Image (cartoon, rainbow, N blue to C red):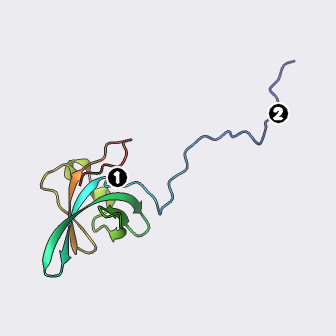
C-alpha cells in the first residue's frame, strides 16, 4: 500500500503570523508625516516629523525629525480613538506628552505603503 512519509520535524507546518512585539506595534499614526507645535523659549514653533515606531506598553510613538533626531513622545489618546474619519478631518489636532505638544497630520500613509516624508 501507498502511504505518506513520516513527518519531518525540520519542515514547518504552522504558517500563522506571529503577533508584533508590544514594543513595536501597529498604530494609526505609524509612517505618517506630522507637524508638532513645540515651545522654544517663549515662542511656539512648528516642526515636522515622521512617526517611525509605536510602543503599546508605554503608549509612546517614536518621531524622526527633519534633522534626523529621534525622540519618544507619549500619545494622550488611545489608538482606538484615532479612527481614519477623525484623522482625515482637516481640523484634527492631537496632543502628546500630557497636552504639552500639539500635532497636526501632514500626510497619512496608505495601507502597505512605506513611510510618508513630507516636510
Q: Nearer the viewer, residue 79 or 48?
A: 48
Query: Left or right: where does residue 3 sit relative to residue 117?
Result: right
Image quarter for residue 3?
A: top right
Query: Left or right: where does residue 103 sit relative to residue 69?
Result: left
Tag 2, which secondary structure? loop
Q: Quadrant of the C terminus?
A: bottom left
Q: Nearer the viewer, residue 72 or 26?
A: 72
Give residue 103's mark. none
Tag 1, which secondary structure? loop
State the image coordinates of residue 30 (x, y, percent, origin top left): 35, 54
Query: Left or right: where does residue 19 sit relative to residue 59?
Result: right
**Label 2 Cα crowd, 10 Å radius (few <14 / some 14-19 / many 20+):** few
**Residue identifier under label 2:** 6
**Which residue is rendered at x = 17% and y = 81% of the image?**
41
**Which residue is rendered at x = 42% and y = 63% of the image?**
56
State the image coordinates of residue 62 (x, y, percent, origin top left): 37, 64
**Which residue is rendered at x = 41% and y = 70% of the image?**
58
State the image coordinates of residue 42 (x, y, percent, origin top left): 13, 81
Amino acid at each position: 500500500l501507498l502511504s505518506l512519509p513520516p513527518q519531518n520535524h525540520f519542515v514547518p507546518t504552522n504558517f500563522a503570523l506571529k503577533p508584533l512585539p508590544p514594543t513595536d506595534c501597529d498604530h494609526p499614526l505609524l509612517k505618517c508625516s506630522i507637524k508638532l507645535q513645540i515651545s522654544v523659549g517663549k515662542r511656539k514653533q512648528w516642526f515636522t516629523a515622521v512617526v517611525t515606531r509605536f510602543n503599546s506598553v508605554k503608549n509612546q510613538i517614536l518621531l524622526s525629525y527633519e534633522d534626523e533626531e529621534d525622540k519618544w513622545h507619549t500619545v494622550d489618546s488611545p489608538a482606538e480613538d484615532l479612527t481614519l474619519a477623525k484623522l482625515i478631518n482637516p481640523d484634527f489636532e492631537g496632543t502628546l506628552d500630557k497636552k504639552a505638544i500639539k500635532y497636526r497630520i501632514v500626510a497619512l500613509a496608505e495601507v502597505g505603503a512605506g513611510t510618508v516624508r513630507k516636510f
